[in-house]
Image (spheres, rainbow, N blue to C red):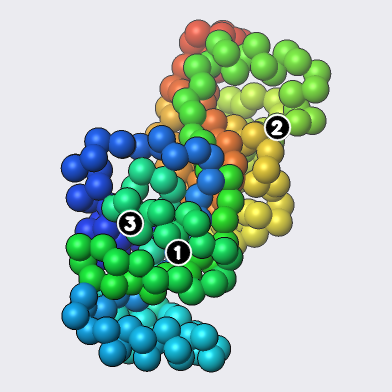
Amino acid sequence: MGRSHSCSRVITASYSAGSGTGGSSGGDREILVQHLLVKEDDQKLLLDLQKRTAEGEDLSDLAVEYSMCPSKEDGGMLGWVRKGQMVPEFEEAAFGAPLNKVVKCKTKFGWHLLQVLSEREESVLEHIQPNEFHVRLQDPSFLEEAQLIDVREPEEVAQASVPGFQVLPLRQFGVWGPEITTKFDPQKDTYVLCHHGMRSLQVAKWLQTQGFRKVFNVAGGIHEYAVKVDPSIPTY
């Protein structure tokens, strides 16, 4: 999941290299964008495509046929983006565009017709240390307000576990992955645990792509938690 297209990389690369705005300087909103790109001097084609989208033709279908951007293979889809990732002209047009309205903008790459399909609050991924996580676990309201996911295998959980976690074994991802947003609330704080913190990080990053607003990876996993916080939990 979460492929990045070369066109998207081109749009973002010169901005991050040139203007130094960097990472997440642009507030807390992400937008889902598709676009098509035509040559700067191809005004006739641009006007024709604008007219066709105004008459109801799908921008993604037109992108497949006419766009110069490699993202045409996916109907011009650039995926979820946030401020600070794009060249200024594209960013200004995209973040100022009403949902689903096709707008045009010009960059050094040519003319773009772009469409914002959806928006969401920017996702946050944090690493939480075992001692801080332990403090939060002591709060009676914590388990009501947060959701805890253990991605280890059942035989591992049988050896050592922390109360309150729902077990979603990573090897069974094909079973629970497609249902994640129906079984868990993307708006709730979500904590992910594994043995040493690597599998959980992989799943935490994937949860971000599924629209989970705030995801915490328990640093060092249950091993670190047992060593630093609760020696009653066996290590393995």
Q: Could you tell me the amino acid type at mark 3?
A: Glu
Q: Which residue is mark 2?
A: 146
- x, y percentage for residue 211? 57, 50
For the residues labelled 1 and 2, the Cα–Cα distance comes to 30 Å
Quarter holding the N terminus? bottom left
Q: Could you tell me the amino acid type at mark 1?
A: Val
Badge 1: few (under 14), some or many (20 or more) residues near its Cα, within 10 Å?
Answer: many
Which residue corresponds to the image point at 58% horizontal and 45% vertical from the top-left?
Answer: 121
For the residues bearing labels 3 and 1, Cβ distance under 8 angstroms: no
Q: Which residue is mark 1?
A: 33
Q: Indicate which disc residue 89 carries.
A: 3
Q: Indicate which disc residue 194 carries.
A: none
Q: Earlier in the sequence, mark 3 or mark 1?
A: 1
Residue depth check, mark 1 versus mark 2: number of the one nearer the observer: 1
Q: Could you tell me the amino acid type at mark 2?
A: Ala
- x, y percentage for residue 156? 54, 34
Q: Is residue 106 left or right of residue 94?
A: left
State the residue in front, 16 or 228: 16
Is residue 8 something one can see in this rendering? yes
- x, y percentage for residue 230? 59, 10
For the residues labelled 3 and 1, the Cα–Cα distance comes to 14 Å
Q: Could you say whether the residue bearing mark 2 is in a helix, strand or loop? A: strand
Residue depth check, mark 3 versus mark 1: number of the one nearer the observer: 3
- x, y percentage for residue 80? 45, 56
Which residue corresponds to the image point at 55% horizontal and 11% vertical from the top-left?
Answer: 131
Q: Quadrant of residue 63?
A: bottom left
Residue depth check, mark 2 versus mark 3: number of the one nearer the observer: 3
Is residue 195 something one can see in this rendering? no
Q: Earlier in the sequence, mark 1 or mark 2?
A: 1
73 is higher (above) or lower (below) than 116: below
Q: Could you say whether the residue bearing mark 3 is in a helix, strand or loop? A: helix
Q: Quadrant of residue 150?
A: top right
